[in-house]
Amino acid sequence: MPATTMAFADALRAVNALKAEGVIDDYAVAGAMAIVFWAEPVPTFDLDVLVLLPRQEGVLISLDDIYRWAGSRGYAAQEEHVIVEGLPVQFVPAPDALALETISAAAELDYDGVPVRVARPEYLIALYLQPGARTAKRRERAAMLLELPNLNRARLDDILNRYGLSF
Amino acid sequence: MGSRSEEYAAAPPAELLLSLRNGKAALHARHSALPLRDKVRLVIELQRIVLPLIERQRALQWWERPWSIEP
């Protein structure tokens, strides 16, 4: 009997299910895999997903519901990653207003017939330029996105101005 | 051993450098325009290429492995 092969689209379907089942309110693929959607492939080993969690009791944000959901589907969770359909996925609760706006403004793209919400390049650049995120690799990726021919420069300038970010 | 001025004289002509830069830009543009499945296929190829290089510099994280999935 042939082995069942997992596919990238299956991981995206699972992330969509996470939203459809109400475990998260919304999401946007971010990080290097978001770059792959807009620009050329870059090496990466995981899928970063910015998530908007439903309102929770208490002060501390918890990913427990996501881990419970993962367990119910047989996805292994280890440290900060969940293996979703063979893909290491890191679910990152939106930590600030820029991340929340990144999620709400995400583009709905299509991967092999599967809808997927992807952070727009202007927001990816802004995320990379945040003071706590400015590593050499991230600056390089921001510069790469800046050269995209269809980058919305007015949108980028607006985001950078509103969040006090610069190159 | 050649003098400094001879080294400069042997520098590649500006036209060649321009042509190389343009070629590289065209390659980036071609890769950017690939269908998404082909891009994910390339990501998996890149994973196989860079993993040994990363491994020479530091210990790998448990999740840093080439994906065993179809693009």
Image (cartoon, rainbow, N blue to C red):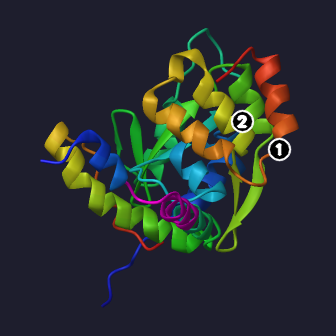
Q: Which of B64 and A163 is in front in this view?
A: A163
Residue type highlighted by circle 1: Asn
Label 1 secondary element = loop
Residue for badge 1: A152
Q: Report the number of numbered marks.
A: 2
For the question of whether residue A121 can be seen, the reply is yes
Q: Which of A65 and A47 is in front in this view?
A: A47
Please give left or right for residue A41 compared with residue A17 in the image.
left
Residue A145, compared with residue B24, is above or below; it is above
Label 2 secondary element = helix
Identify the subunit bearing mark 1.
A
- If the image is split into quadrants, where does the C terminus of chain A sit? top right
User: Bounds of the magenta span?
Assistant: B11-23
Is the residue at mark 1 from the same chain as the one at mark 2? Answer: yes
- If the image is split into quadrants, where does the N terminus of chain A sit? bottom left
- Residue B60 locus on image (x, y percent): 21, 42
Q: Which of A164 and A13 is in front in this view?
A: A164
Residue for badge 2: A123
Residue type highlighted by circle 2: Tyr
The prevailing secondary structure element of the residues shown in magenta is: helix
Please give left or right for residue B58 compared with residue B7 in the image.
left
Give yes or no for residue B15 being in the magenta stretch: yes
Crowding near the residue tagged with mark 2, few <14, some 14–19, many ≥20 C-alpha atoms within 10 Å:
many
Identify the subunit bearing mark 2.
A
